[in-house]
Amino acid sequence: MTRFNAPFEIHVHGDVPLREDIAYEQVEEALKPLWRYAGASSLASAAGSHYEDEPGIRIDVQAHVLHMCWTVTGDDDFRQAVEETCMGINDLAASGAPIEVSFYDAEYDEDDESNPAEARDDFMMCFVGPTPAAIMQIQRDLLVQDVVGLMERHFETTELTEVVTAIDNLFTRRFDDLVNSMQLGRPPRGGHGGPPSGHGGPRKPRHLH
């Protein structure tokens, strides 16, 4: 549904690998904040994008991937819908994945020379995954890709090993801090009400060099 006088055209883009046991109804429930925001009564009725040349929201049943290339009109309150959607997708994801959300100022006219104001365009990157480790892994991978891509203009790839190692160390430290914070709120092992044997925290992200 088109929101008249909406200040933004909002584009959601991402490909999320899904677990093989996930059914369509589960995806529809996870994406409910998005299709409800669009004023629809179901995922199917909201799957089409604001722009016809965009594929919208699709589920590849064979490959088990949720594809999103979808635009809706709205306001800043869309951020809340995205956050709720990401929480739902976490439970369905097979691995970590990024979701890009771009806000384009629908009222800005770059050809209007009489208006000195700048466009209110904005951008947010969200990450989803089945575990905190999976989310940190995709964050780490994208950061390495961006940093290496930037520095390759000035250095050979073989010279950047130390940079990648430094990034890995930062994420390892963040992961360890997360695990330690979880342990602080946990009863001692063997005590009454403690976690069952073999139950551990999130697995540490792998380090790719």
Image (cartoon, rainbow, N blue to C red):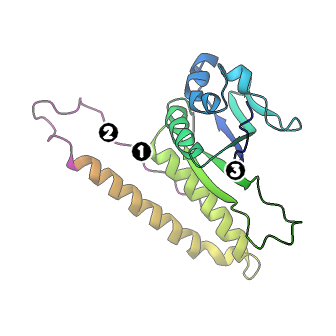
Image quadrant in which the N terminus is located? top right
Tags 1 and 2 touching, CB below 8 Å: yes
Q: Position of residue 49 (x, y in %)?
A: 79, 34
Q: Secondary structure at mark 1?
A: loop
86 or 18, nearer to the observer: 86
The CA distance from mark 2 to mark 3 is 46 Å
Q: Residues within 10 Å of mark 1 (few under 14, many from 20)?
A: few
Q: Amino acid at mark 2?
A: Gly
Residue 193 is inside the magenta segment: yes
User: Vertical placement of 25 versus 19: above or below?
Assistant: above
Tags 3 and 1 touching, CB below 8 Å: no
**Residue at 82% across, 34% down:** 55
43 or 150, nearer to the observer: 43
| Residue 60 appears in the figure | no
Residue range corresponding to the magenta coloring = 184-209
Judged by depth in the image, the label closer to the viewer, 3 or 1, is 3
